């Protein structure tokens, strides 16, 4: 995290931290008024500036359409706060006088992950569990801007964090859900390792990662956009692999494709990907139909060299893909 960004004290929120005070009552009034003149979008940007985010990171967090727009928002914020630069804006926005809904409102984007990593003694707060997160609650000292919160007509897609581990355990304990993935229910230890791997992707590649989907605040499943990992999948830059896994009780409601469509849009429109691809066992009809449903086209059938092949793996794996140009032309 940037040296100028004040990080929250563990177990506390930024709003509790004493900051430098305005010099005169006039300063105080001006600062109190100024933040109230920020638009909601500018308030969101200010949140991220306070976290030490760069313009490109703020843009990736899907708050704005591009870096130029971010720069323009930052410039308005500096003017409103009477600050010369970002460091000045952070200081000004940290004073009690300027602490308004702009500073204490819920986290605008899925920035940062739950601070309670697996094995951490810190349990997520009720606000974190409910998804009504505040930046101050979810951003630790080492937090970084990453995945955006996404929405569809029925789904809220939140960046995966430790609070979702139990849902992953439930998913992977259903033999039908993991039939074409592991061939048998996964142990808790295995799920914990996969969970850590998914979080690591999000830490490694800005914007990419896994999202849990909530419909009416109920967990439905997860979706992912991950970078390629095998040489035969092509370049690691500009591409992402789409994945999804839903609880069985939510199958055949159009939810997998609804979430996948939004991830494809996010990948091309917000993250600048040039290609989204997906793979599954050739016999996984539901997954193939979902790929087709969101516009991916069949590319190839191939055989994976694995130690313990699953039943029906002799039919091979299939790859489907969609190029950005094709998606734009639709
Ligand atoms: C694959 C999976 C996510 C699909 O979820 P879903 O919510 O049922 O999918 P949707 O309702 O959005 O359906 C998407 C399309 O697939 C079709 N479809 C869904 N299940 C199907 C099945 N068993 N056979 C054939 N088509 C199927 C739907 O009719 C729909 O097609 P349409 O858009 O042309 O009408 C779900 O079955 C699952 O979680 N499976 C276990 C995990 C898994 O295999 N993940 C993929 C690993 S790569």
Image (cartoon, grey):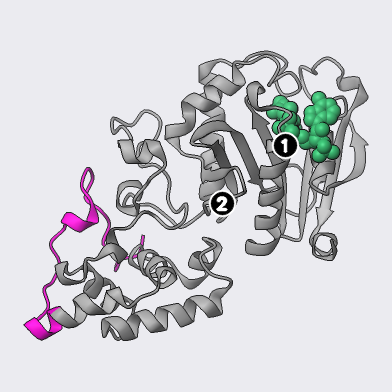
Please name the residue shown 89% across and 27% down the image: 316
Residue placed most toward the observer, 68 or 103: 103
Q: CA distance from mark 1 to mark 2?
A: 17 Å
Whether residue 147 is visible, yes or no, is yes
Please name the residue shown 23% across and 45% down the image: 10
Image quadrant holding the N terminus, namely bottom left
Part of the protein shown in magenta:
1-28
Residue 272: image tag? none
Q: Looking at the rendering, which quadrant does residue 242 occupy?
A: top right
Image quadrant holding the C terminus, namely bottom right
- Mark 1–mark 2 contact, CB under 8 Å? no
Q: Element at badge 2?
A: strand
Residue 254: image tag? 1
Query: How many numbered marks appear?
Result: 2
Residue 235 coordinates in the image, percent (x, y):
76, 54
Please name the residue shown 60% across and 43% down the image: 154
Residue 163 coordinates in the image, percent (x, y):
42, 33
244 w.r.t. 106: above or below: above
Q: Is mark 1 within 8 Å of ligand 1?
A: yes
Whether residue 284 is visible, yes or no, is no
Classify the position of ligand 1 by quadrant: top left, top right, bottom left or bottom right: top right
Residue placed most toward the observer, 100 or 281: 100
How many other residues sit within 10 Å of disc 1, few (<14), some (14-19) or many (≥20)?
few
Question: Of label 1 and label 2, which has the lower sequence position?
Answer: 2
The secondary structure making up most of the magenta span is loop
Viewed as shown, does residue 2 lie left or right of 261? left
Q: Is mark 2 within 8 Å of ligand 1?
A: no
The residue under label 2 is 150
Viewed as shown, does residue 87 lie left or right of 24? right
Asked if the stretch drawn in magenta spans residue 159, the answer is no
Residue 278 coordinates in the image, percent (x, y):
78, 42
Viewed as shown, does residue 270 lie left or right of 199? right
């Amino acid at each position: 995290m940037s040296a100028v960004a004040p990080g929250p004290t563990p177990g506390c929120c930024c709003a509790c931290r004493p900051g430098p005070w305005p010099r005169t009552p006039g300063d105080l009034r001006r600062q109190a008024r100024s933040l109230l003149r920020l638009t909601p979008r500018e308030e969101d940007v200010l949140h991220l500036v306070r976290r030490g985010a760069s313009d490109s990171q703020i843009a990736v967090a899907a708050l704005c359409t591009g870096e130029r727009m971010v720069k323009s928002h930052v410039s308005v914020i500096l003017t409103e706060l009477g600050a010369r630069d970002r460091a000045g804006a952070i200081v000004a926005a940290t004073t009690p006088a300027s602490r308004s809904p702009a500073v204490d409102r819920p986290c605008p984007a899925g920035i940062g992950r739950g601070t309670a990593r697996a094995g951490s003694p810190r349990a997520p707060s009720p606000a974190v569990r409910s998804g009504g997160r505040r930046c101050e609650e979810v951003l630790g000292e080492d937090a970084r801007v990453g995945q955006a919160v996404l929405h569809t007509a029925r789904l809220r897609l939140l960046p995966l964090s430790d609070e979702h581990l139990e849902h992953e355990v439930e998913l992977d304990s259903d033999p039908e859900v993991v039939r074409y993935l592991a061939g048998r229910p996964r142990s808790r230890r295995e799920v914990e390792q996969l969970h850590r791997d998914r979080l690591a992707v999000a830490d490694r590649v800005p914007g990419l990662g896994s999202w849990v989907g909530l419909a009416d605040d109920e967990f439905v499943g997860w979706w992912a956009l991950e970078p390629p990992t095998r040489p035969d999948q092509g370049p690691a830059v500009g591409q992402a692999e789409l994945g999804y896994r839903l609880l069985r009780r939510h199958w055949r409601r159009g939810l997998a494709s609804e979430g996948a469509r939004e991830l494809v849009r996010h990948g091309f429109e917000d993250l600048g990907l040039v290609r989204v691809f997906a793979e599954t066992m050739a016999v996984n009809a539901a997954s193939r139909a979902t790929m087709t449903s969101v516009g991916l086209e069949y590319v190839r059938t191939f055989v994976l060299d694995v130690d313990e092949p699953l039943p029906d793996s002799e039919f091979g794996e299939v790859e489907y893909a969609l190029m950005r140009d094709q998606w734009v032309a639709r």
